[in-house]
Amino acid sequence: MSELQPIIPRDENLHGAVSLAAHDTPEPIPITEQEVGEYREQDRFLPIANVSRIMKASVPPTAKIAKDAKECVQECVSEFISFITSEAAEKCQLEKRKTIGGEDILYAMSALGFENYVETLKIHLAKLRQNSGATTGAQSGNSSREHPIEPRVDGE
């Protein structure tokens, strides 16, 4: 059986002639709707190994976690992240910004009814930024392993 060739649309400017210059590169092979659905579902879930590691850290070392429990939590946390992120993205879009920041996530959580977590997450965000700034400063300014001595805040 001969191989099917793609149909090349006519270029109307050439009055019926086929323009090959614009179509020199082969068209990509189309994928099925099923393949698209499978790819998107896999792509939107956190890696199961990461979910499993976090779950194991929360239970005694002798406890075992069933595969379906890991998959259930994987789907739940992935959906939660998508839910919060889409709300934050909507806020950024309204403000004509392209980058979602930590404050946008906190705003989204509060707007979606997760305000009980916002204060704790503000503390974590501040610590993350403090550690990130200290790491960046140490890496860019000093190549040795020494850490600068900082004054104590409590006055002792």
Image (tube, rainbow, N blue to C red):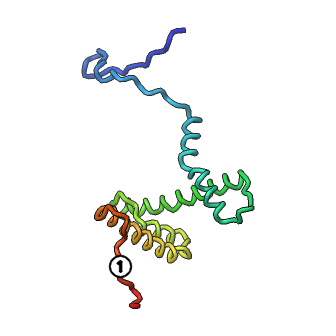
In the picture provided, is 109 more to the left or to the right than 16? right
At horizontal 65% and vertical 57% (from top left) the residue drawn is 73
At 57% across and 60% down in the image, what residue appears? Answer: 80
Residue 91 sits in quarter? bottom left
Q: Is residue 26 rendered to the left or right of residue 78?
A: left
57 and 68: which is toward the camera: 57
Task: For the C terminus, give its image quadrant.
Answer: bottom left
Residue at image x 53%, y 68%?
112
Task: Write down the quadrant of residue 52 in the picture.
Answer: bottom right
Residue 94 placed where, x, y %?
A: 37, 62
What amino acid is labelled 1 in the image?
Glu
In this view, the residue in front, 100 or 144, is: 144
- Picture coordinates of residue 24 (x, y %)? 33, 21
* Residue 92, image x, y percentages: 38, 62
Name the residue carrying label 1: 150
Looking at the image, the residue that sits furthest to the top is 1
- Which one is in front, 20 or 76? 76
Q: What element carries label 1?
A: loop
Locate the N terminus by quadrant: top right
